[in-house]
Amino acid sequence: MKKYNFFIKISFICFSILSTSFSSYANSVSPAANGIQYPVGLKNWRVISSSFRTDNNTQRVILGNAIAINASQSGKTNPWPNGTILAKLVWKNTEHPQWKAAIVPGEFVHSEIMVRDTKKYKTTQGWGYARWKGEQQTPYGLDESFSQECASCHSHAKDSNYVFTIPASIP
Amino acid sequence: MKKYNFFIKISFICFSILSTSFSSYANSVSPAANGIQYPVGLKNWRVISSSFRTDNNTQRVILGNAIAINASQSGKTNPWPNGTILAKLVWKNTEHPQWKAAIVPGEFVHSEIMVRDTKKYKTTQGWGYARWKGEQQTPYGLDESFSQECASCHSHAKDSNYVFTIPASIP
């Protein structure tokens, strides 16, 4: 009986941890025009890399779901495995008020994801694309043809499985 | 009995999730000269912000432990609550090979943390500092006096509880 009580206690602790992690991110975001849903819990995902764009004055953090993190840590990213989701959180650049040489996140621009499914997304090289704009997280694109726009740009990264993100070294 | 079996199964699932999350980050990093340990699981922490430094050619992602994330999401960061740990992963800037206008993480420079404990770290405004250099994660500082160097720089951010990081908007 003591053993069961122990397991019950552990279960509640685990449930608490998991529910705390996910409950604050209930999915109120509309799906993209191609049907791709905003992943629940995306903002709990681990970091894969970051980047700073001088062409459109933005910076971003790149996160990954568990499959992406495992692939990234084991260097198996060409191709990325089916089930991978990579997510970018993008902000306008702004100067830090107390440290002028630091350029930090300002206005939130959009979140965007790439979902790896070689069967489902055959016409876009095995990747499903979605983007949600601004603080309101409004789906980008009037109809599902927007994916071709994404795929066209990502063709520049053909040699790295159509992914621009290079996992950062995190020792 | 069925109920207990259910809890036992759930416990194992939870244990698996938690152990997978943490086992890959066993703590092999030496503590800083002031005794501060590299937090186990740091690389699993959630994102608070990012920044790009033009003065020393680096970029960084700022992560937080659960206390920091809760404070950040509820806007209660002045002061940050006791128990907060903020972590920075810092890289040298490098040009993306396929997209010249994207500046991405190159060589890993260091990881550094700020630990909030108003009693323990009274002499450094309630913050304990530590830094681990390079891929080898070698503790920074010959003796514990290095903390004064950190605190001195952070005095520029006195109005924001000695913290430069401004949590980014993540809708």
Image (cartoon, coloured by chain):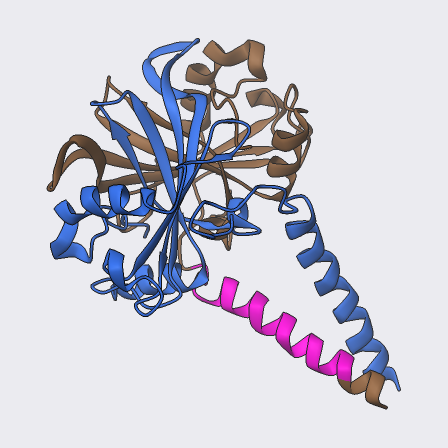
Chain colours: A brown, B blue
What are the residue bounds of the magenta stretch? Answer: A6-27
Instruction: Describe residue A44's horizontal placement relative to residue B88 as left or right.
Output: right
Of residues A137 and B48, the one nearer the viewer is B48
Name the image quarter holding residue B51. Answer: top left
Of residues B72 and B165, the one nearer the viewer is B165
Looking at the image, can residue A91 be seen?
yes
Say if A91 sits above or below B171 in the image. Answer: above
Q: Residue furthest bottom?
A: A1
Of residues B89 and B145, the one nearer the viewer is B145
Residue A36 at x, y percent in the picture: 51, 42
Residue at (63, 32) in percent of width and height: A73
- Decide whether the magenta segment is chiefly helix, strand or loop: helix
Instruction: Describe residue B9's horizontal placement relative to residue B152 as left or right.
Output: right
Say if B149 sits above or below A162 in the image. Answer: below
Instruction: Describe residue B87's horizontal placement relative to residue A119 as left or right.
Output: left
Of residues A59 and B59, the one nearer the viewer is B59
Residue B43 at x, y percent in the picture: 52, 44
Residue A43 at x, y percent in the picture: 44, 50
Residue A14 at x, y percent in the picture: 64, 70
The N terminus of chain B sits in image quarter: bottom right
Residue A8 on the magenta span: yes
Say if A21 sits above or below A93 in the image. Answer: below
